[in-house]
């Protein structure tokens, strides 16, 4: 790719990002929604104004941006946070994943689809997009107990989703007559290896960061943690998202002398996230809408219903306030990078269904990323009342 095209593309995308931010503030819309819509319009499906060479950026940007998000979400799992909301976080996160898998798989099987395809799509449906949810919370400054609990849930529910997805692949391979031992070992390696990578980066970082000098070195240290987590995870073939969560959780709970890495990542993640969301929108292939139209609509309906039911059940089990049961599942509709990653893995395991799995996942991801943040914003505004938010501000000020 020519240097001038690279620079002009980056400059144009960042300028669009600034304009998007201004429009979002003016009309009270989530930035994520506008960025993805811009990507859809600018992508090959409509106006095709983004150079084709930019496609090669997506994997790097997705891995970097989502590892940053995972690190920050892991940083929200403090001891105090878990003691205050731990029961609710565990109950709701597990309930949403279980209900999603059961309801989505049952719906597709009853509709006559191959059980293998139904199980894979159900596993993908269990994934959430912590980046979009976290962006909405930060953009509008929600600080009540509902938003605190929501951040904790989205930091951990992808762990349950990844575990469930790995076991579902074992079941799918068993249905196809394939050996289960290798698949089970792969799943255990992806999850256990990610925990090992996160701990291997997080423990030294908890002790070493913040000891050289305040200020600029902290930004370098924070970037080192993120890139080492992402790079080692990709190299070893483990979940970079889970590795980032583990590293962030360890740093926030063991680095009692500072919290700088989290502040620095918050300061620099914006450009990465903006490019990631635009390119996610641009990846949509419009010609598959009609071919898989029924699957797409069924997936959206079943996943939405399962989120609502799972959130309500989890809130009852966790003895959460009534507003949690009404709005928590609704707030968890956004879905992005983790789902696409699951689809790529599943497509490799089931080559006969690769096209349908990837197409349905990418297209429903776009839908959930366009409308999901809007629904998340509504849920937060209903559940985190102004009085609760102001009380929280007074307590933290």
Image: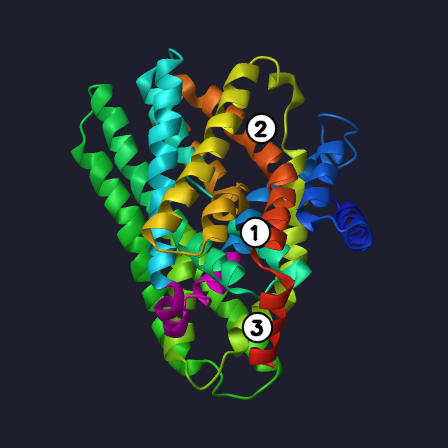
Residue 10: tell me if it is visible: yes
Image: 264 above or below 376: below
Circle 1: element type: helix
User: Where is mark 2, residue-wise?
Assistant: 363
Mark closer to the chain start, 3 or 1: 1
The quadrant holding residue 296 is top right
In the rendering, which numbered label is found on residue 392? Answer: 3
Marks 3, 2: nearer the viewer: 3
Q: Earlier in the sequence, mark 2 or mark 1?
A: 1
Q: What residue does disc 1 label?
A: 133
Q: Earlier in the sequence, mark 3 or mark 2?
A: 2
Tell me which corner region of the image, top left, top right, bottom left or bottom right, holds residue 5. Answer: top right
Q: Nearer the viewer, residue 7 or 145?
A: 145
Left or right placement of residue 68 versus residue 272 in this view: left
Q: Position of residue 181 (x, y in %)?
A: 16, 35
* Left or right: 308 in relation to 33: left
In the rendered image, the quadrant that contains the N terminus is: top right
Query: Which percent across, then down, holds residue 214?
Result: 57, 87
The answer to if 357 sits in the magenta stretch is no
> Local crowd at mark 1 within 10 Å, few (<14), some, or many (≥20)?
many
Q: Which residues are magenta?
A: 69-85
Q: Which residue is nearer to you in this view: 57 or 258?
A: 258
Q: Nearer the viewer, mark 3 or mark 1?
A: 3
**Measured Cα–Cα span from mark 2 to mark 1:** 19 Å
Q: Residue 363, how many percent across, how many down?
A: 58, 28
Label 3, secondary structure: give it: helix
Mark 3: few/some/many CA within 10 Å (<14, 14-19, 20+): some
Residue at x 53%, y 71% (from the top left corner): 262
The chief SS type of the magenta part is helix
Mark 2 Cα within 10 Å, few/some/many (few <14, many 20+)?
many
Quadrant in the picture for the C terminus: bottom right
């Amino acid at each position: 790719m020519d240097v001038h095209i690279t620079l002009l593309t980056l400059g144009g995308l960042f300028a669009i990002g600034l304009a998007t931010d201004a429009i979002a503030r003016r009309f009270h819309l989530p930035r994520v929604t506008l960025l993805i819509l811009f990507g859809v319009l600018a992508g090959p499906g409509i106006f095709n104004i983004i150079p084709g060479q930019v496609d090669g950026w997506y994997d790097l940007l997705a891995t970097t941006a989502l590892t940053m998000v995972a690190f920050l979400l892991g940083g929200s799992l403090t001891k105090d946070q878990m003691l205050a909301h731990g029961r609710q976080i565990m109950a709701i996160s597990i309930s949403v994943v279980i209900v999603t898998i059961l309801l989505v798989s049952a719906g597709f099987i009853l509709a006559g689809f191959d059980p293998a395809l139904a199980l894979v799509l159900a596993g993908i449906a269990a994934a959430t997009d912590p980046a979009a949810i976290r962006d909405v919370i930060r953009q509008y400054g929600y600080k009540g107990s509902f938003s605190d609990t929501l951040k904790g849930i989205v930091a951990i529910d992808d762990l349950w989703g990844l575990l469930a997805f790995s076991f579902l692949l074992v079941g799918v391979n068993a249905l196809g007559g394939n050996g289960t031992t290798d698949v089970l070992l792969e799943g255990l390696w992806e999850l256990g290896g990610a925990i090992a990578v996160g701990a291997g980066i997080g423990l030294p970082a908890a002790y070493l960061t913040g000891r050289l000098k305040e200020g600029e070195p902290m930004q370098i240290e924070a970037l080192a943690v993120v890139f080492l987590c992402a790079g080692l995870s990709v190299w070893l073939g483990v979940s970079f998202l889970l590795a980032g969560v583990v590293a962030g959780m360890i740093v926030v709970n063991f680095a009692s002398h500072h919290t700088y890495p989290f502040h620095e990542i918050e300061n620099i993640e914006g450009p990465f996230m903006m490019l990631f969301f635009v390119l996610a929108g641009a990846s949509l292939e419009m010609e598959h809408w009609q071919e898989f139209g029924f699957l797409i609509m069924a997936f959206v309906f079943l996943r939405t219903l399962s989120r609502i039911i799972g959130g309500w059940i989890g809130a009852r089990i966790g003895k959460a306030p009534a507003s949690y049961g009404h709005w928590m599942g609704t707030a968890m509709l956004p879905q992005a990078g983790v789902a696409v990653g699951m689809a790529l893995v599943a497509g490799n395991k089931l080559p006969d269904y690769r096209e349908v799995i990837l197409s349905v996942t990418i297209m429903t991801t776009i839908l959930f990323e366009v409308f999901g943040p809007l629904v998340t914003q509504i849920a937060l505004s209903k559940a985190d009342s102004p009085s609760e938010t102001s009380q929280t501000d007074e307590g933290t000020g």
